[in-house]
Image (cartoon, rainbow, N blue to C red):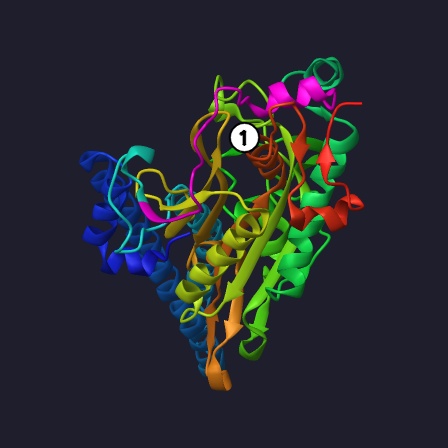
Amino acid sequence: MLDIKWIRDNPKVLVEALKKRSWSSDDAQSTVDDLIARDEARREHLTELQTRQERRNAASKEIGNAMRSGDAALAEKLKAEVGEIKAFIQDGEARERELDKALNDALAELPNVPLDDVPVGKNEDDNVVKRIVGKVPTRPNWVKEHFEIGEALGMMDFERAAKLSGSRFTVLKGGLARMERALGQFMLDLHTTEHGYEEIQPPLMVKDEALFGTGQLPKFEEDLFFAPRGDGRLGLIPTAEVPLTNLVREEITPHEKLPLRYTALTPCFRSEAGSAGRDTRGMLRQHQFYKVELVSITDQDSSLAEHERMTECAEEVLKRLGLPFRTMTLCTGDMGFGARKTYDIEVWLPGQNAYREISSCSVCGDFQARRMDARYKDKGGKGNRFVHTLNGSGTAVGRALIAVIENYQNEDGSVTIPEALRPYMGGLEKIESK
């Protein structure tokens, strides 16, 4: 959430930021004007409330003076005035809550402001290559996509998954099921033992407040799954970013404890409502999938350096697995709602003859922290500031499985196991049909 004081002081900057995010000039200007008008009405109301409260206090003292001087008429007149003021204040406090909610609801719909070095563009075609790692091999004519390989091995079953749960689910068996588990464990071990992240096992269902804190609500409600609970509901996490980032909500973290670095391997649940018709074959876009998430909580001076570090941690997973990839700087029109800057890591999939996203690493500044009221004690204990939050996939386990299957496939239909995974596979070197 953006700071309304910053918006008042920088309305033109926000208008230009929204235009960079593909808002029309008219929509951007009218939205900013509306926010400022809402804030002005709220501030005027608060000023009036304060004035009335001051008059009530003064009139109360005047009643005492009138009583002591024996002026009963004046005392009664002042009591009547105080009664009217009390009624106004009572109604005014309810109005204050209404104005606060209306302003906060409007602020909650605003995306974050991109950093100045983010390339301006409309969609993924305008993203910029940051670096390319690994050479894309010549594609032989026998190369297949992951679902063709998995089905031929008898270890990837979409038909039975559809009987159980419908479309966009998969049943993995045997060696491929074990490899998916191995990938998750490998990533966790790498991030905890070498990269300094603390492993967390968070809840998989969270309150609306947690989803609001990281920006999934209210904007992306249709992409979530919910389970009823009493008179309310709990949301199934679309990513472990939600519970991990909310670990610091409504808290003040001592500066010396920053940065906090968390990682978790969890299932994730997404309805993919906004992706109808995309990637309907195979495992690339599922309602349920596993992902290793990385979350960092920093002070305001360290977040940009932490963003580079986090991206390198995610890249190291692909380097250890020997998978070619490229890292892209997302343009303003393709960047996520809560991000100030995002790097997407795209792994090479020979079956598709294309790079596809396997990780997205974003720095959010204090955007999420304002929604969560998450702060840190400034150096020297001179005050409290909002923390800066970062999140990234380290990486998507299902997509890593796809990448390994396609990049390590053999002409006979078997799949060679990358050396980094063999300790997690009991020394097995190859997956092949029985």
Tell me the residue that label 1 is attached to: 223
List x then y, in percent, for residue 347: 48, 39
In the image, residue 70 above or below residue 395: below
345 vs 215, nearest the viewer: 345
The type of residue carrying mark 1 is Asp
How many neighbours does mark 1 have within 10 angstroms: few (below 14), some (14-19), or many (20 or more)?
some
Q: Residue at 55% x, 27% y: name it.
A: 285
Helix, strand, or loop for circle 1?
helix
Q: Is residue 55 left or right of residue 213?
A: left
33 vs 153, nearest the viewer: 153
Q: Is residue 228 visible?
A: yes
In the rendered structure, does residue 132 fall within the stretch colored magenta?
Answer: yes
Tell me the quarter of the picture where residue 385 sits: bottom left
> In the orientation shown, which residue stands out farthest toward the bottom?
380
Magenta residues, as a range?
129-157
Q: Residue at 30% x, 60% y: name it.
A: 6
Q: Is residue 4 left or right of residue 208?
A: left
In the rendered structure, does residue 409 fall within the stretch colored magenta?
Answer: no
